[in-house]
Image: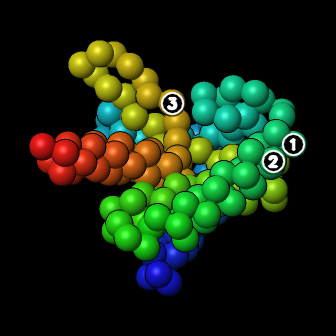
Amino acid sequence: MVIYYGIAIIVILLDQLTKWLVVKNMELGEKISIWDPYIGLLSHRNRGAAWGMLEGQMWLFYVVTLLVVVGIIYFFQKEGKTNRLFAISLMFLLGGAIGNFIDRIWRKEVVDFVDVLIPVIKYDFPIFNVADAALTIGVVLIIIHVIAEEKKNKKKVS
């Protein structure tokens, strides 16, 4: 069980380290091209949720994040012990939630820095960070888990 929490800790540490490096070494709005024009680092701050929604509603983010963290730990203790994929997905969610929560508590904003352009559809993806990526990975893994469980349950019924 403890090893799973290690995933969340690694996500949190990597998230906070990368954010610290951006804040320490880049001016706000500065962009560093990694693979021009598709991927770059762009020092950005977000005072809201995804895509800047609910900007300035920090109290709401504090409450929601605390509820989410409690829910993740509850489901991990209840269901994560029996399913490795579900446990891992919950730990990605936990690490991502706590990573952005730390920013909201200490900085009153979230540091974002990964800028991706998707040329096929000419879409400049919203700027994100390691915590956001971990949240996305966690959700994708939960979807895979749910689909796998559905297939397994259908085989049991037939």
User: Sequence-wise, which precedes: disc 3 or disc 1?
Assistant: 1
Q: Is residue 56 above or below residue 147?
A: above
Secondary structure beneath dot 2 equals helix
Relative to 79, 112 lies left or right: right
Question: Marks 3/2: CA distance?
Answer: 24 Å
Q: Distance between the residues labelled 3 and 1?
A: 23 Å
**Residue under label 3:** 126
Tell me the SS state at disc 1. helix
Q: Is residue 19 visible?
A: no
Residue 96 in the image: above or below residue 144: below
Q: Left or right? Give the position of 102 relative to 116.
A: right
Residue at (29% x, 15% y) in the render: 121
Mark 2 is on which residue type?
Answer: Val
What residue does disc 2 label?
A: 63
Say which quarter of the image contains residue 112: top right
Q: Where is residue 158 in the image (x, y as percent from the top left)?
A: 12, 43
Looking at the image, is mark 3 or mark 2 nearer the viewer?
A: 2
Quadrant of residue 89 within the rendered picture = bottom left
Residue 96 screen position, x and y as percent: 56, 56
Categorize mark 3 by other alpha carbons within 10 Å: few (<14), some (14-19), many (20+).
Answer: some
